[in-house]
Image: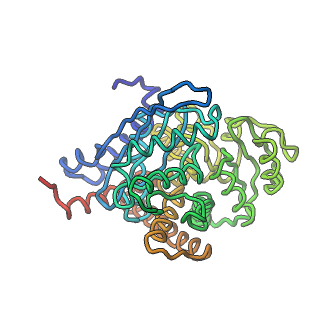
Amino acid sequence: MGYTEAEKELSVYESMAARFDVAARQLKLDAGLYKYMRCPNREIIVHIPVEMDNGTVEVFDGYRVQHSIARGPSKGGVRYSPQVTLDEIRGLAAEMTWKCAVVNIPFGGAKGGVVCDPEKLSRGELERITRRYTAEILDYIGPERDVPAPDMNTGEQVMAWMMDTYSMHVRHTVTASVTGKPLDLGGSRGRREATGRGCMIVCDQALKRFGKTPESTRVIIQGFGNVGSQAARLMYEAGYRITGVADLHGGTYNSRGIDIPALLEYAHEAKGVKGFPGGEAAESCELLEQDCDVLLPAATESVITSRNASRIKARILVEGANSPTTPPADEILFDRGVFVIPDILANAGGVTVSYFEWVQDRQGYFWTENDVNDRLKHIQVAAFNDVVHYGEKHNVNNRIAAYMLAIDRVAFSLKLRGIYA
């Protein structure tokens, strides 16, 4: 597929591939392993017929890409959005491989999606889409094969439907078939907060490197869904000063600090942060360029590009979203001395606690929330130190260091396993 330069910069898959290529060259990766690791293991395209509430039948396109099973079952979320494309899912599946390897958990990477607009669908229509999508990919998923999880516009209820559909087909309840489920169906304590908590954990580590404390740190958060709102709440409770928050419809800014509990209550009632009386109105793109110590993009892909990277004033960039920064923007940020904590490290708290959920389901024994949070902190701190030390050793930025570390681990597993013929 041909891309213009602008399209290439904004393509999730092309961004992943560009970073993979740089890291592979730095590692002097064997040519055969390079070809093997750059391609996904399997790409599944399904067409989902659904009877709508008005009696008509619509057909929705669905995807599941399994990038790697070298280190264990593939793992990754399922997103529902009108913007879902195979290119996007392919890129995000590879990112999941590197993310799992960076935090050293025994999964490969996968990603799924259905092209639909959940805001225009009833609960019944969403359930029928979910169940038929699950049935169509049933032969390729499961606790030992590929373990789906929530992603954009999906959550605990969608995972409950997926788990039930899988279980009905295999004729017994398999709670470990998906993660991100409700607690009463085998979910894990701490899962809902995990990605936001992981962002705070790595941010804490970065502050130590710069001799700063949470109380002296101004934070701007773009995105106020699960990741952004949980990160805001946890960081506020830890003493950080949250000066700006934005979502899809607008934002709010207060240099003295935003009352996050009040904003959470307001956003729940108003379905967004726009109009919050505790701050000045601000556009989402404006907040990205506002003066702050920590910028935490937690919304969507490609919000920091070659067009605005030179105007980013943050000292530390914590990527709560997947692929919020494009490769050309990486170079600009690195040259300007911005300390980037890349997505495959910063937002790995979600997949880490998904791993914990999978483990708990398989053993039938569930941990306390303190146990979950302590184990998450141990893994994220170790991964942060691994990435930073790898970068210093090889004289590369944190993102390329994270890719190199991940690729090295996956390549080592592939060498040990060999090529089945």
Q: Quadrant of residue 38?
A: top left
- Given residues 168 and 107, the one toward you in this image is 168
Name the spot of residue 183 as percent of width and height, x first: 60, 64
Residue 421's place in the image compared with 38, above or below, is below
Residue 325's place in the image compared with 378, above or below, is above
> Quick check: can you spot residue 205?
yes
Name the spot of residue 126 as percent of width and height, x first: 57, 39
Q: Quadrant of the N terminus?
A: top left
Residue appearing at x 66%, y 57% in the figure:
231
| For residue 252, side relative to residue 81 (left or right) | right
Residue 400's place in the image compared with 393, above or below, is above
- Given residues 186 and 193, the one toward you in this image is 186
Residue appearing at x 60%, y 76% in the figure:
368
Residue appearing at x 32%, y 52% in the figure:
68
Q: Residue furthest left?
A: 421
| For residue 106, side relative to residue 162 (left or right) | left
- Given residues 174 and 140, the one toward you in this image is 174
| For residue 226, side relative to residue 26 (left or right) | right
Residue appearing at x 42%, y 30% in the figure:
8
Name the spot of residue 34 as percent of width and height, x first: 24, 47
> Quick check: can you spot residue 317?
no
Q: Residue furthest right?
A: 277
Q: How many marks?
A: 0
- Given residues 134 and 340, the one toward you in this image is 134
Q: How is the image coloured?
A: rainbow
Q: Quadrant of residue 108?
A: bottom left
